[in-house]
Image: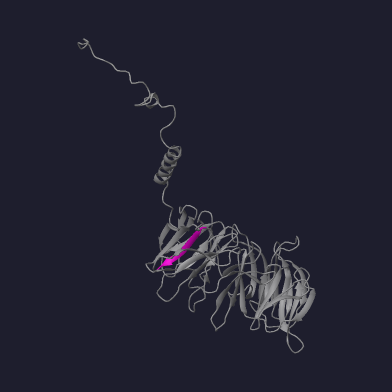
Amino acid sequence: MGAETFGGPVVIDLGLARGEPETYAAPTRSTVPAWFGPLVAALLVLWCATASAAPPPPVLSPLLNLRVGPADSYVVTDGGQLLAQSLGGLSMYDLSSGRQRWHTEPAAPTYRLRMASGLVLLRPWSAGLTGVGDPGTTAVSLATGDARWRRTGNVVTLAGSGALLAVAGVRSLSGPGRRVEGPVDALDVVTGATRWRVRVPSTAVLLGVPAVGGAPPRMLLVHDDRNAAVHDLTTGAPLTTAVLPAADYGPDNPAVVGGLVLLRHPGDGATDLSAYDSATLRRRWTRPAGDAYEIHACGPLTCLVGPDGVRAVDPADGTQRWHRPDWRGVEQRGAAMLAYAAPEGTIETVGLIDPATGRVLADLRGWRPLTGTGGRGRVLVTHAEQAGARTMVAVASPGDARPRLLAALPAGTGDCQAAPARLVCRSTAGELIVWAYRQKG
């Protein structure tokens, strides 16, 4: 049988029983796992976020740097401004931006920077030195730095009012009151001229009586013959007078707290504390004072400080509300109240306290509070483990049991003052440095 031959290619159909299925060429569903797509998308988002996110800013960011002398003063105003002396000049800076608002050249370095009624009151260091004439007090505008007026003698302020008083013979600059002699002149804030005068025959303790119960602020003079007089600050006229008990009158006795004039004076074999209405000078109550040597406002109460600790009494009737025998002092810092102890003769901070109950809200033992406040009841504190170690800065808040750490101060800095979101410190290099700070977390 002869073989059959073909003239072209031969195609043999093997069917679908074996070989590659038709769906391999055009699959009807995905050939990758279901989780692969979301994984790639998540990785892409994570990579984009990481690549675009900037590193967090430092906790302390330098905002301002000034050259200052060791005797140059500075102060942070209630309006968030920095008023600073710098090598003979006086400048105002905005602490929100670090921008200089104004600069002026006073005649001489001043003892301290005081502000009242939109003015800066400057009194040179030479004031009170033997053989040096009276340098007077110069008033500079807080808004522009322009000199407004100058007065001989010392110009003082009264707590709780915008009044300016020119006095002679100030015996003490400490304490809430001042012992003065000679005339007391009320000044016009704009011109510095005398509006009215009260003559003091000998000496007297001068105190401010803040506004209470709708009554305006007033001036209290307790003369050395024990006659006390409350004066109107608009006219200087006496509103009421009274004779007070014999006492050791001075800058801290009597004290005006919560609408009362509180006086420590000898009683029946011990020292008593008497409270007088600041408007009428009528005696409200008398209680034993113990060994108290200081009187402070403690929120709604009045704190008596002495070697037997801190006692808080109700100003309405003198009833004791709480007693902390191991405490040796209290201090108001804006909306915050601090307590101090002296366990081994050295003053140490106890913590932020609730003045109504004496309860410790934040433990600050081992920390030292800075002057100024951090705003909203916060206080900035520092701590150094040992001599020569870096100083740590933290923020203490009533809601935290312990301070929240900010950062370590740069080496060679100290003498710091706190302001809301700002820290102002001197450096050993002769600089005044302002940092903006942010809390961690």
Closer to the camera in the image, 351 or 147: 351
Q: Is residue 27 magenta?
A: no
Q: Position of residue 378 (x, y in %)?
A: 57, 63
**Furthest-bottom residue in this view:** 269
Closer to the camera in the image, 116 or 68: 68
Using the rendered image of the protein, determine whether residue 418 is visible from the camera's viewpoint.
yes
Q: Position of residue 109 (x, y in %)?
A: 46, 67
Using residue 395 as the reference point, say whether residue 251 is left or right of it: right
Q: Which residues are magenta?
A: 421-427
Q: Residue at x 69, y 80 (%)?
A: 224
For the N terminus, the image quarter is top left
Q: Is residue 423 magenta?
A: yes
Q: Quadrant of residue 166?
A: bottom right
Q: Quadrant of residue 256?
A: bottom right
Q: Position of residue 91 (x, y in %)?
A: 46, 58
Closer to the camera in the image, 161 or 53: 53
Using the rendered image of the protein, determine whether residue 169 is visible from the camera's viewpoint.
no
Q: Position of residue 86 (x, y in %)?
A: 43, 63
How many labels were placed on the picture? Answer: 0
